Image (cartoon, rainbow, N blue to C red):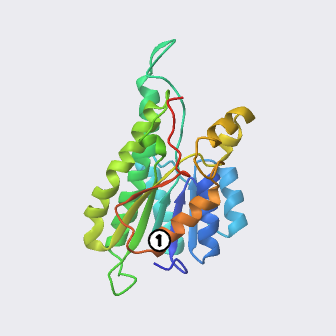
Amino acid sequence: MNVSGYPAIVTGGASGMGAETARALAAAGAKVTVMDVNQEALDAVAKDIGALAVVCNVASGDSAQAAVAAAKSAHGAARILVNCAGVAPAKRIVGRDGPMPLEDFKKVIDVNLIGSFNLLRLVAADLYAEEPVDEVGERGVIVNTASVAAFEGQVGQAAYSASKGGLVALTLQAARDLSGKGIRVVTVAPGFIATPMLLGMPDDVQESLAQQAPFPKRFGRPDEYAKLVLHIIDNQMINGEVIRLDGGARMQPR
């Protein structure tokens, strides 16, 4: 699908992979809405790329519904959804203070898994009422963001791995569920990407993590994630698939 002229929503659009994807979509001619909970950073990204900024808590049904409605009012029903919103706190199942508080686990699931599904269901429902964009019958594309932690969760990543594993399991099922209306669903599972979170780690930790990739021995860049997303949107045969973006790295337990 050619993105030019079509409405697109990017969650987690205030920084990192979300901001870079929003920038790439806007440069390709899409009518972009960026969503995030960080209004100051969100407004800065939107101003820079000429996008619509909408504050949205993806884990909230009411907030997401209002945000999608605002985007639709401004640009029309989104043909493209890229879910980048996520949190990644680290905590062991049983730590020095006892078992992980259930609310800590639930918060990660709410944002990463339920939040992504929340936007997916709303955007897909709008697409059901839209006409196809081509003779094949395609109506839109939804890209979720998992992580290699879905497959090789490290110590302290129980909640994060479970949330991303849920997105991996959802991918083919959602693609099958929505196939009758020409909606593709694809998931990207990044490895170590040079986002503000990773770049805030000590230099020796960064070097150790980067060396885990067979080649290239460096962090991935947010623009490499964005390029993959644009290719997924363009390539109609990519559907129901989870694509690792990790330089061949396989995470160690620690």
In the picture, the quarter occupied by the N terminus is bottom left
122 above or below 182?
above
Q: Residue at x 68, y 45 (%)?
A: 196
Q: Nearer the viewer, residue 198 or 215?
A: 215
- Tell me if 246 is positioned left or right of 120 in this view: right
- Tell me if 214 is positioned left or right of 240 in this view: right
- Tell me if 50 is positioned left or right of 247 in this view: right
Q: Residues within 10 Å of mark 1 (few under 14, many from 20)?
A: many
Q: Residue at x 51, y 48 (%)?
A: 57
Label 1 element class = helix
Q: Position of residue 50 (x, y in %)?
A: 67, 70
Task: Say if residue 202 shows up in the picture.
Answer: no
Question: Image quarter for residue 122?
Answer: bottom left
Disc 1 target residue: 233
Q: Residue type at mark 1: give it.
A: Ile
In the picture, the quarter occupied by the C terminus is top right
Q: Nearer the viewer, residue 80 or 1?
A: 1
Q: Position of residue 165 (x, y in %)?
A: 38, 43
Q: Residue at x 25, y 71 (%)?
A: 180
246 above or below 124?
above
